[in-house]
């Protein structure tokens, strides 16, 4: 089974195994400006987040300095007791210092909570608004966009990209503010204790940065490989699971297992290397931090002997070293998060900036209830690519009650006419009119409300059978639903099911047969009672007996309505008022069945090929 690697992959990365493999934006600065502009709507809330984050960091940073004073008091009290110069430790003073420290940490926690609360609100509002904008945008995009993109690619904008932006935004903004404030504040506090000890600490920083850079550089390629092989193995499992019948039919179990084992081996090799490098990060950073503690302890002891600092200052300084190293590691992670956030934002903004359908008309000069009698094509020219016109100067008039058949070999472009009628695409020149009204001058909702479609590919959703039929007319009562089911000869089948009309169709709708699904979609169209019908070989999925019944129902439904029938079996459209014959995307012949046979052209060739004698 072939495997694919374009599926969503799990978030893993070099920083403790938690950061995603980095995907960079094509226009980082431009996208970042758009994101900042988008976030400017919440500028007051963001300002409060900044203030609370800074306040939380500041109050937290002051803590070790005050804790050092308590340590100094204990040390001085013990030394004084031994030397006989004091009565011992002043517990009241220490209690006052510790209460002050407790108050600072409580205030810091409150500010941190407020900052996280507001940021979570901003984050969820941004996520909600983006999904809402994407949803609205989907309904404004032309069909050509959806035909040029895969379903997974479009869904990824709504799910993966928005989720990545949401998670990265929530974490990165808070961490950037907290880490930057902590880094600056810690340096200031260390300078107030001892510039010399601060200098020694700063000298350690390049070593830490070099080690972080080295680990990230060497681990990134393994994480990228892990992501690719993870996609391969997921694709293989998905394909084998969905096609397990084919695998068993062709005895492909051994081959499938071998392929899985090869991919699994590659995933194992890349994953353990990635995790090994990732796991090295914290031990190495701890080692460098501990090295700093040793140097500071030695230097601090010397400075205490020289009476340049207090004993408690050594404790405070070692706390600041720890607070100094953590923001460095966080900043590296933040860089990865921001890259992912901007890359996701870029894809979201690209989607939101896609060219929309031609705006709808603002003025309505027709009565919708009276439309649907005559469909006219006037000198229509159209091509999916403007440099290659496939419908050249097509004109025809279809009156109420007439049946228009569209025939041709597979891939001839039969559905093109339907797409133009429904205004999924606009004609390059000419006009399509309904009762004299150009469809370009109609609202799309009004235009499409005139049509009912039954396609080869059925679409049902996970709900009751009754609600699937009612989708054709949401205002219809239960009796109307039952009548539509009877007219489409599906009522008997429904009533034989365990729960009848209340039976739930599963997500794939595979708890009913393909033919039964087709019958349900026909019932849906009957319930809608449209003025114009489009039928794409609607009986192709049913047996011969049922086809006869459905054909009778469709004949009754088509009576008095303009009907467009995409036909593969030409024997079913002999009585059509107009037959459009398509070849290579163009209309090569048009006329009645008898007229086209007399021409002895392409239609006659198609028709006769379906009735060739096989007695030879």
Image (tube, grey):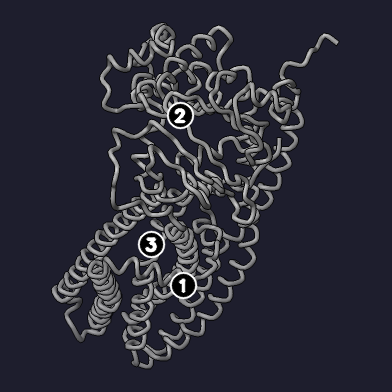
Whichever of callouts 1 and 2 sits on the residue coming sooner in the sequence is 1
Check whether the beta carbons of the residues at disc 1 and disc 3 lie within 8 A of each other. no
Q: Can residue 20 be seen in this view?
A: yes
Q: Is residue 352 above or below residue 45?
A: above
Residue designated by label 3? 169
C-alpha span from label 1 to label 3:
17 Å
Could you say where residue 70 lies in the image, as x and y percent from the top left? 24, 76
Q: Is residue 614 left or right of residue 223?
A: right
Whichever of callouts 2 and 3 sits on the residue coming sooner in the sequence is 3
Q: Is residue 448 above or below residue 563?
A: below
Write down the quadrant of residue 91 in the picture: bottom left
Q: Is residue 604 left or right of residue 70?
A: right
C-alpha span from label 1 to label 2:
44 Å
Could you say where residue 527 lies in the image, as x and y percent from the top left? 35, 21
* Residue positioned 36% across, 51% down in the render: 360
Could you say where residue 290 lies in the image, as x and y percent from the top left? 49, 72
Whichever of callouts 1 and 3 sits on the residue coming sooner in the sequence is 1
Residue designated by label 2? 453
* Residue positioned 66% across, 26% down in the render: 596
Q: For mark 2, give the secondary structure.
A: strand
């Amino acid at each position: 089974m072939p495997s694919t690697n374009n599926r969503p992959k799990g978030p893993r990365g070099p920083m403790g195994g938690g950061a995603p493999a980095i995907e960079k934006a094509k226009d980082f600065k431009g996208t970042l400006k758009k994101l900042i502009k988008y976030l400017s709507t919440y500028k007051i809330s963001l300002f409060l987040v900044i203030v609370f984050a800074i306040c939380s960091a500041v109050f937290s940073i002051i803590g070790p300095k005050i804790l050092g004073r308590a340590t100094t008091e204990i040390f001085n009290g013990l030394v004084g007791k031994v030397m006989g110069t004091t009565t011992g430790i002043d517990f009241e003073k220490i209690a006052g210092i510790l209460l002050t420290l407790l108050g600072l940490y409580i205030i810091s926690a409150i500010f941190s909570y407020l900052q996280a609360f507001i940021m979570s609100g901003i984050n969820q509002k941004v996520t909600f608004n983006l999904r809402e904008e994407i949803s609205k945008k989907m309904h404004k995009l032309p069909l050509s966009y959806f035909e040029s993109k895969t379903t997974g690619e479009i869904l990824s904008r709504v799910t993966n990209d928005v989720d990545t932006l949401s998670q990265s935004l929530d974490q990165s903004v808070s961490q950037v503010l907290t880490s930057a404030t902590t880094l600056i504040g810690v340096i200031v506090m260390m300078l107030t204790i001892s510039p010399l000890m601060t200098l020694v600490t700063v000298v350690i920083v390049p070593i830490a940065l070099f080690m972080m850079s080295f680990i990230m550089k060497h681990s990134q390629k393994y994480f990228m490989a892990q992501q690719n092989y993870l996609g391969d193995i997921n694709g293989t499992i998905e394909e084998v699971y969905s096609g397990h019948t084919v695998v068993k039919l062709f005895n492909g179990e051994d081959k499938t297992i071998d392929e899985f084992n090869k991919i699994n081996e590659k995933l194992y090799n890349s994953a353990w290397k990635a995790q090994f490098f990732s796991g090295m990060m914290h031990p190495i950073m701890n080692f460098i931090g501990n090295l700093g503690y040793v140097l500071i302890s030695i230097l601090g002891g010397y400075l205490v002997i020289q009476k340049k600092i207090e004993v408690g200052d050594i404790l405070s300084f070692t706390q600041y070293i720890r607070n100094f190293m953590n923001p460095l590691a966080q900043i590296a992670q933040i860089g990865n998060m921001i890259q992912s956030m901007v890359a996701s934002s870029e894809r979201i903004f690209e989607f939101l900036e896609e060219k929309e359908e031609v705006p709808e008309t603002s003025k309505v000069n027709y009565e919708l209830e009276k439309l649907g009698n005559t469909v006219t094509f006037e000198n229509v020219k159209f091509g999916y690519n403007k440099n290659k016109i496939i419908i050249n100067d097509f004109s025809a008039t279809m009156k109420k009650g007439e049946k228009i058949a569209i025939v041709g070999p597979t891939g001839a472009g039969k559905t093109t006419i339907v797409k133009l009628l429904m205004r999924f695409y606009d004609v390059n020149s000419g006009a399509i009119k309904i009762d004299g009204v150009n469809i370009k001058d109609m609202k799309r909702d009004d235009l499409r409300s005139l049509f009912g479609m039954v396609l080869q590919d059925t679409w049902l959703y996970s709900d009751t059978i009754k609600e699937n039929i009612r989708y054709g007319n949401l205002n219809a009562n239960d009796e109307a639903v039952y009548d539509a089911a009877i007219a489409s000869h599906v009522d008997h089948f429904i009533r034989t099911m365990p729960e009848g009309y209340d039976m739930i169709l599963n997500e794939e709708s595979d708890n009913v047969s393909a033919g039964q699904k087709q019958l349900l979609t026909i019932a849906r169209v009957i319930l809608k009672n449209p003025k114009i019908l489009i039928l794409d070989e609607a009986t192709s999925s049913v047996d011969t007996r049922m086809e006869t019944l459905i054909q009778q129902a469709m004949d009754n439904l088509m009576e008095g309505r303009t009907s467009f029938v995409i036909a593969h079996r030409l024997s079913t459209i002999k009585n059509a008022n107009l037959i459009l014959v398509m070849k290579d995307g163009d209309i090569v012949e048009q006329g009645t069945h008898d007229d086209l046979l007399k021409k002895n052209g392409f239609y006659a060739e198609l028709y006769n090929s379906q009735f060739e004698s096989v007695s030879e």
